Amino acid sequence: MIAGNIPAKDRGVLETRSVTRRDFLKIGGAGLAGAALLGVAGCGGGSKNQQGGGKPIKGGTLQATSQQDPPSLDPALAYDGYSWALIHGLFVTPITYTRTGEGFVPWAAKSVPKPENGGLKYVFDIHPGIKFTNGESADAAAFKYQIERVLNPKTKSPLAGFYTNIVGAKKYRSNPKGSVKGIKVLSPTKIQFDLEKPDQIFLQTMCIPSASAVPKKAVEKYGQDFASHPVGAGPFKLEQWKRGSKLILAKNKNYFDKNTAARLDRLVYTIGFDPHTGILRVEQGTADYVYANNTIPSGDFNAVVNNPKWKSYVHHATLNELGYVYMNMKMKPFDSPKVREAMQYAIDKGRIIQVINGTGTVANQILPPHMPGYDRSIKNIPYDPGKARSLLKEAGYKNGFTLDYWNSNDDDRPKIDQVIQQNLSDVGVKVNIHSVSLASYVSRMPTGKIQIGFSTWSEDFPDPSDFLNILFNSDQIPTNNQPQYSNPKVDKELNRAQYMLDRKKRLALYQKIQKQILSAHPIVPLYFGVEYDFISPKVGGFYIHPVWHQVYADWYLTG
């Protein structure tokens, strides 16, 4: 998830993005902000059904559990789903996503601005009178301050690369003095952004937490501790955070918009309960929701999901997340197109989905079903060991070969590895599995020395560039482009699509690009991730949002 809007050479720290927000949480969260971030899983496609059939109760306290604290509540630093959902409740951005994630709606701004000057200029008109919970004004200057703070290398924001297309941003990153030329406060309620190139995803970057207004005095007061003492202008405020014990969000009674105000009085997270214990507490009624990194643990999955008693507690939705096997095209035997094609037929995707408890659907392409540009005309390549053996023979490998396969050993990944090892053995290929810690795997991935491995990728925002540009542009070799796929024609088309303003033509070009990439077989698309959540049916307003996952301001209790 990170950086897709700018060529890699301009992305700063985002150049090394390869960890999705789910795995960013697993390996230490904010501690990776200035380090290499690499290929594993996070955001989604969203559920259409909303929970809550009882009579809504005004206010009330919702009890939730989590195994760990969020890594950071600073919108300039947070890069995991757990933190993003909380920040979305504590802060405001100029605009935000619709419930489906397929469009924009105004938030702190009065409207979603239209591009001006051929897509090089955007002006946001901010609602007057918005206040942070410390009394400072959440005005145009507060938004300018935050974007410049994200761009300042001293902040070490993992999201800085999203904003380097703003005029003067690159210069500011190299010498953060004065202000960014392309960010102009026209009045207390108007802010203008000038871009170097027209950019279809600029508005996406105005929705995510890094674009949140922050109060300058509070940031300067707390310094790095602002991550633990966030002061925002959102539907909630942070009432208490005792690390390892309790995190409490309370309704912001001075929030500016009654239509999007929090419906709960409090959201209380009790920290330190593992997901299994959290599920038991929800079943017993002592908790209402368990945060388990957007899944139900393998040990509880069948007992919970297949038990009619808990049917109303279980919610799931397909994510904008791809699980895949990548093959290093610079290393034998994967320099052979027929060998790469053979791998498509050799791996049993259905069996992999079985061993991960159905938390995926068969993938037939790179772009997930809820992603703009998803191509319904692409057919899945069936599991066919005989066809795989035939292709290997044509490639000159009738006696097979040996592969060094790499993956991390967290969650259900060892189960995936075992299926792949057996599948390839069935077509005469021996697989040596290197199963290591996630941190070790992450550090190895950018070396470009992995022959074959497993990875997942998920969106930062719903735009095809966030998959195709990052994973297959040659300027992303080897950090994110693990198969080291390189096609000058594709590079040229990816860079052209990035700045096209005609949405229909742009998506058609991405579909063409995707087919070109798939025809070279640099990866085996395995599955699109499915999120599972366990929450009491007495909680109303719950749905799985494609970007935020949880939208706490919409939740309410029923009686």
Image (tube, rainbow, N blue to C red):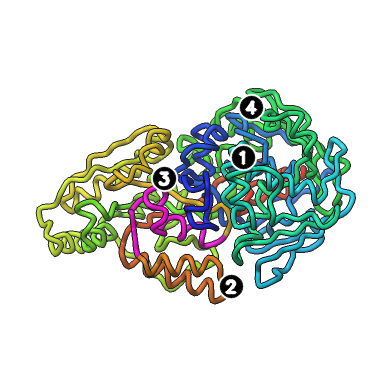
Quarter where residue 538 is shown? top right
**Disc 2: CA contacts within 10 A as few (<14), some (14-19) or many (>=20):** few
Reading the image, the residue beneath label 4 is 271
Nearer mark to the viewer, of 4 and 1: 1
Indicate the secondary structure of the residue bearing disc 1.
loop
Q: Earlier in the sequence, mark 1 or mark 2?
A: 1
Quarter where residue 248 is shown? top right
Tell me whether the residue at label 4 lies in contact with that at label 3, contact meaning CB atoms closer than 8 angstroms.
no
Reading the image, the residue beneath label 3 is 356
* Alpha carbon distance from label 1 to label 2: 30 Å
**Disc 1: CA contacts within 10 A as few (<14), some (14-19) or many (>=20):** many
Identify whether 141 is placed above or below 411: below
Q: Residue furthest left?
A: 399
Residue 503, label in figure: 2
* Alpha carbon distance from label 4 to label 3: 27 Å
Amino acid at pointer 4: Ile
Quarter of the image where the C terminus is located:
top right
Amino acid at pointer 3: Ile
Amino acid at pointer 2: Arg
